[in-house]
Image: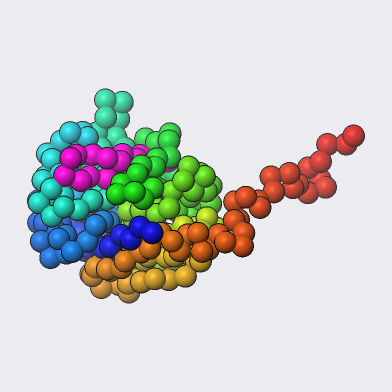
Amino acid sequence: MTTLRIATAQLALVDGDRDANLDRIRALLAHCGDSHHVVVLPETCTSGFASREDVERLAEPADGPTLRELQALAARHDVLIAAGLAERAPEGLYNSQFLVDGSGVVGHYRKTQLWLDDVDKFRPGQWLRTCTWHGVRLGQLICFDLEFPDTARVLADAGAELILVSNGNMEPYAHVHRNAALARAQDNQVFVAMANRTGAGRTTVFAGGSMVADPFGRVVAEAATAECTLSVTIDTDAIAEARRLYTYRALRRDDLTTPATRTAA
């Protein structure tokens, strides 16, 4: 049995204002960091992504000042932080999620499924990522990734037990990610912890609805639209319990087609 206490932070962020957003994150960690093992933050949580100009100005490399600040916060509060950030690399910009503890970056994922507002700002990542932290295999996804069954399936096939989702879902699509979080948890019989942004950005209103789902596809905790932090304790023994009678991934048939797609003998 491994238990983790998780906080999913539903934050009202400010597009284009790194300092204001970091102040919110510092206050959040001061409030709940010491009492949790993992804190999940939304997508592009220090820059927002309302405009390409914001992203160009605020994107940082993986060893930039924001990651150093998050490492210092993680060390101070003895916690793992899952943070969505705009990343600057030599070949271009990525919409990334970093897992940071007191030792530094332990997980680094670049969003593979780019949504409409991403494509003029970011390059797509090419790899899905997992890592082990405190004995639990963690998978990483960002926002639109969650809407594709294969992303979570690949992570589960790689042993992920808990998928951490940095989210930036907006209205009127709140129901889409609620359904997707529950479905990805049930499809793969894993935990999903999703932290979404809330409140008004420059060009859109974010949907809130942060959630933790269990391996049976049930809601463990769910937020409405107000700024808040969900606090839950998960027990990875629930994964074995969900898979005791069957495992969906093992029973999946890849040989099924429709008659129209079959090649004549």
Q: Which quarter of the figure is the N terminus placed in?
A: bottom left
Q: Name the residue furthest front.
A: 1
x 18%, y 64%: residue: 35
Q: Is residue 251 above or below residue 264?
A: below
Q: Is residue 133 above or below residue 210?
A: above
Q: Name the residue furthest top.
A: 90
Snapshot quadrant of residue 61: top left
Q: Which quarter of the figure is the C terminus placed in?
A: top right
**Image position, residue 101 (x, y; %):** 20, 46
Magenta segment range?
A: 99-112
Query: Residue 55 vs residue 218: left or right?
Result: left
**Image position, residue 60 (x, y; %):** 19, 36
Snapshot quadrant of residue 191: bottom left
The mark tally for this picture is: 0
Q: Name the residue furthest right.
A: 265
**Image position, residue 169 (x, y; %):** 36, 59
> Is residue 247 located in the magenta-colored stretch of the structure?
no
Instruction: Pick the residue in front: 168 or 5.
Output: 5
